[in-house]
Amino acid sequence: MTPEYALALLKEHWAIDANDTALLRLDGEQDDNFAVSVAGEKRHVLKIMHSGCDLDSLALQLRALEQAAPLGLTPAPIPTRQGELIATVNTPEGVRLAWLMSWREGRLLAHHYPHTKALGEDFGRALAKLTQALSSLPQPPFASEGLWDLSNADALIDQVEAVDPERRALTLSALTAFKDTIKPQLRALPWGMVHNDANDYNVLVSEDRISGIIDFGDLSWQPRICDLAIALAYYLLDKPAPINACSDVLRGYNSVLPLSGTELDVLFPLVKARLAVSLTISSNRQKDNADDAYITISQAPVKRALKDLQSVSDAFALAAFRHACGLGITDASTRILHWLQNNGSDAAEVIAVDQYRHCLDLSIGSLMLGTKPDNATLEGLTTLIDKEMAAAGVTHSFGRYAEARGIYNAPQFTGHAYPTTESRTEHLGIDIFCAPGSAVFAPLPARVHRIANNDAPLDYGHLVILEHVTSDNDTFYTLYGHLSGDSVAGLSEGDELRKGQAFAAVGDNHENGGWTPHLHLQIILDLLGMDADFPGVIAPSQREVWHGLCPNPAYLLPVSPELMDASPDTQALAEQRANLLGPSLKLSYRKPLTIVRGQGQFLYDSHACAYLDAYNNVAHLGHSHPRVVDAVQQQVALLNTNTRYLHPTILEYAKRLTATLPAPLSVCYFVNSASEANELALRLARTFTQREDILVMESAYHGHTSSLVDLSPYKYAGPGGSGRKPWVHEVPLADDYRGLHRRDDGKAGERYANTVSTALNALLEADTPPAAFLVETLPSVGGQIEFPEGYLRRAFDAVHAAGALCIADEVQVGFGRLGDSFWGFESQGATPDIVVLGKPMANGFPLGAVITTRAIANAFDNGMEYFSTYGGNPVACAAGLAVIDTIEADGLQANAKARGEELLEGLRQLQSRYPIIGDVRGRGLFLGVELVKDHESLAPAAGAASRIVNALRDKHVLAGTDGPLHNVIKLRPSMIINRDDVSYLLAQFDAVLSKLG
């Protein structure tokens, strides 16, 4: 169907003038679809139905749209000039049916990011309301057994051979399970007319709310739970926690249209069946239409989903779905929990404990464990625990429930995945650390349900599961792990135990899975068919469901459950922060992170989830680098004082630091921060030149003190700023992408340097010559700018000719970050008079510095003493020395160059695929990605930059935004990143851009 023919139909049947109309062909499986724009504005959608479409089925679609109209979510049919909703048209392909409907604004759910909890719930509500609206439609008299009808999924079993071998078995398993188990249950469930295809390409989003549900072509009489299963099957695609995503939709759906337990029983198998249906149909059609991208639009994510869901049991999914719908994890879970709360205090002691007062901190943020890898080994952990217990004077100590731990670092917890992939980190029981051989007692009357030896390293070792029955005749279980094999040798499954009866003993590390001797105690309300393989450690994204299945075992101990509960509470921290800290202190990201640990290139949140830190350039060598940690610990244990005493460390550090700088930069002043360093640099310049005025660059930022805010256009010209002071003078930002002079101008560097000369001449003529030109050698807040070639050298020459000094602010880019050069000014062939250092120079320990010439230092020695209480203290200098040692010993400048080149190449490949990327720039590990709405006007895409950075955060990559227009994504990872980190960062950037770009 050609657009010209479609325009003719519009004029003939709907009186739409072709002269003012434009058509855009839309994707469709069988029909010809066109978006109709009138006067440049999208108004309608023209649908010319496939030749096999009958009038009755199309009339049913239109009636469904009429029923749904009050919801404001669906398009409205537009009558022809004869008042009919359907036109019969003669086309080159024969007689076909055509109709016109209103255009609905919105972004396809498949292309929207993020899919927040609120959006999922809104989707569920919208779908339920649509189902309600369609419920008054009667079952049609004509047959409705479409290929996509989920109630007929088993009809595709014979076509599974078309699916690639890697997913064929999973596909067949899902369809066979549907045929054997689910289909027989469907007839007894509620049926009705349903949309039948609420996939992510048929759902629209505006302002993070569902704005439309379109394409009623698969409308069918089906079990209503099938409609929900179809929506969930597509909503979960490529979600890191697919069951959580489904639960979000379920919560919203159930709030409008409550679901029964029997409907939930079949829901997860139906979801998997729909994925199998989608893959089978697309695989078969692909054989005959290999080049049709529409046929396979969801094939890759569906394949990934089938594989990912393989690890989710039907029983766990059902528990999660019941929890989302407020039905309780199981039918009996609420009753059992109440029984435990009311009767648990009568339980016998599980172990004869002297005092219930000492808890060990084994969390990811534990100061006891620190970041040394050896502390997570059996020997290291046992030594630390023994030391802690001895210091507390106890023979028993406790490991807390719901504690997120970093010690679970073996493959069975991490899955050999990249570190940011969610691992099993959260402890589901309570640990009782005690001597091997300590007797274990039944807390309640019990029957021995299971005895096992899970002898894999870091598993339970010998374990026992006891079965208990409440006064309501409900069954629950207690699990006891890390036992002695000999102690359970005489125990048999089915044995009855009295309350308080000894039945086992704590094992040692040779038989308990290789752990420090302790008992793992866990309450389980439903074993979910897992029995001895029931987990004691779970992924934090699933914590709500697992906590419902495994409540705090402290209910069976003579201690407050709150004492034993280590659940992190981000909301409480946020509320305390709002009350205790100034409101101008801002948090990063839409969903703030509670960061409790840093190690290498990763930061860890309170759930022990890792994030690749590509943002915080303070941790130059990576977080908590062992050389820096050791240097600080050793020196602070010996001496920390000020510069009024002779000390060799400050002199050694000054010697090593000045050795990296060109002559005549040879004299050091050490302070505590870059702001303090810039303040001192100003004093040096003003004292030496006897001038006050300062030249700065547009959009610059140099520090947070009052005088530096006055010298930072980013601050004084921004929100809350008071404007430029008379003694401050700006030159243009030497940005060769969107500035006055562009990259294709071979003389951009010279032209920008001329703007400095012009500004200097004006100041000289006004008899207000400047003391200095203060400039970041590669502006960061300005947008990760790399100056055009020759700019800084020529600018410095002009400044010197005017009798002023050049102050190089190297806070962001120094110490080898650029790869090619140790300092930013070196990359421009320039030499400053004063260099300012901060941020990375001690890897996070407070340290700043000013390095200048002997002549400038002598001029500053004018009788007024300069003293900084903590500046240059031995501890800070020891940290600084460790940084320089590590950069040199580990070849980190070369690593910055190599990894930076890989990042630049990868980002430029993304730029070639995503038009939103206007520019990729920088060098080494100081990179900027500028986002624009179009490449002509360079209109900044600030909103997209914010969304992308937040989306990267959700994918566990930390980046930031910068630039005067807030549209530049800045990447400044630590100097130790490796190729795997670069690959991961680029893959996640690609994944986010595919949704947002």
Image: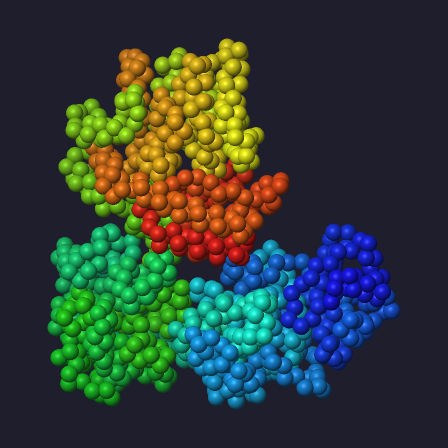
**917 shown above or below 146:** above
Residue that appears at 27% across and 22% down = 667
Image position of 391 (left or right of 885): left
At 79% from the left and 71% from the top, the residue drawn is 91
**Color style of the picture:** rainbow
Farthest right residue? 82
544 is higher (above) or lower (below) than 690: below
Closer-to-camera residue (710/236) = 236
Image location of residue 759, percent across then percent down: 52, 19
Relative to the observer, which residue lies in front, 4 or 694? 4
Q: Position of residue 775 (x, y in %)?
A: 43, 27
Q: Is residue 662 above or below residue 42?
A: above
Camera-side residue of 521 and 751: 751
Q: Quadrant of residue 504?
A: bottom left
Q: Tell me if residue 555 can be seen.
A: no
Q: Is residue 26 left or right of residue 588?
A: right
The picture quadrant where one finds residue 881 is: top left
Q: How many marks?
A: 0
Q: Residue at x 27, y 24 (%)?
A: 668
Where's the N terminus, which quadrant?
A: bottom right
Above or below — where is 609 with respect to 305? above
Residue 322 locus on image (x, y percent): 47, 75
Is residue 227 shown left or right of residue 834? right
Q: Position of residue 767 (x, y in %)?
A: 50, 10
- Residue sitting at x 49%, y 67%: 301
Kindly indicate the quadrant of the structure image that contains residue 974. Answer: top left
| Res 696 seen here | yes
